[in-house]
Image (cartoon, rainbow, N blue to C red):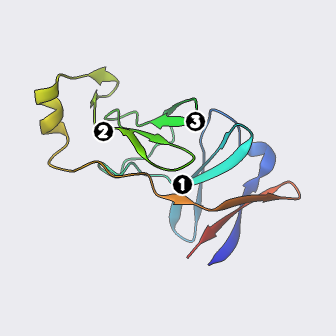
Amino acid sequence: MSQLEAADADDVLEGAVHAVTLSGTKIGLTRVNGTVQAFVNKCPHLGLPLTKGKIVDGVITCPFHGSSFSLCSGAAQDWVTGIMGMNMPGAVRGVITMGKTPRGLAMLEASEVAGKVFVALG
């Protein structure tokens, strides 16, 4: 597994996603309680980017279908709650899921050294 330089540490902020591409993989970087977290920047539901997702208390919510994930573990907190920020009733949610079962966010190992953020790929 190789550690690749992903960003300047100052570019990775609490409550925001800093998007980068490393070796063809789209990655999101953020901080949770000061610690850098890295994840594959696509929602497990349909593969859409989480870059504009809302982050609250270490959980990111997909801006497209409302699925939410822990930014520390990747665990799914909620699965497909609506469309573009509008909550939908249960029956409609079932259609929006397109038969996909809840899956967690793909997390990556990240480290911070000498003002740089590194991500392990491989």
Label 1 element class: strand
Q: Which residue is mark 3?
A: 58
Query: Of the residues tagged 1 and 3, which is closer to the observer?
Result: 3
Name the disc covering residue 4, or none: none
Please tell me which residue is depicted at 67% across the width and 59% down the height of the picture: 110
Residue 7 picture location, percent across and down: 73, 55
* Residue 79, disc: 2
Labels 1 & 3 near each other (Cβ < 8 A): no
Label 3 Cα crowd, 10 Å radius (few <14 / some 14-19 / many 20+): some
Where does the C terminus fall, quadrant-wise?
Answer: bottom right
Image position of 91 with respect to 21: above or below: above
Q: Residue furthest right?
A: 114
Residue 59 position, x and y percent, is 51, 35
In the picture of the structure, the residue carrying the numbered disc 1 is: 39
Q: Earlier in the sequence, mark 1 or mark 2?
A: 1
Q: Secondary structure at mark 3?
A: loop
Q: Position of residue 119 (x, y in %)?
A: 66, 64
Q: Compute the Cα span from label 1 to label 2.
A: 18 Å
Q: Residue at x 35, y 24 (%)?
A: 85
Q: Position of residue 69 (x, y in %)?
A: 45, 41
Label 1 or label 2, whichever lies nearer to me, is 2
N-terminal-most mark, 1 or 3 = 1
Q: Amino acid at mark 1?
A: Phe
Q: Nearer the viewer, residue 24 or 102?
A: 102
In front of the other: 2 or 18: 2
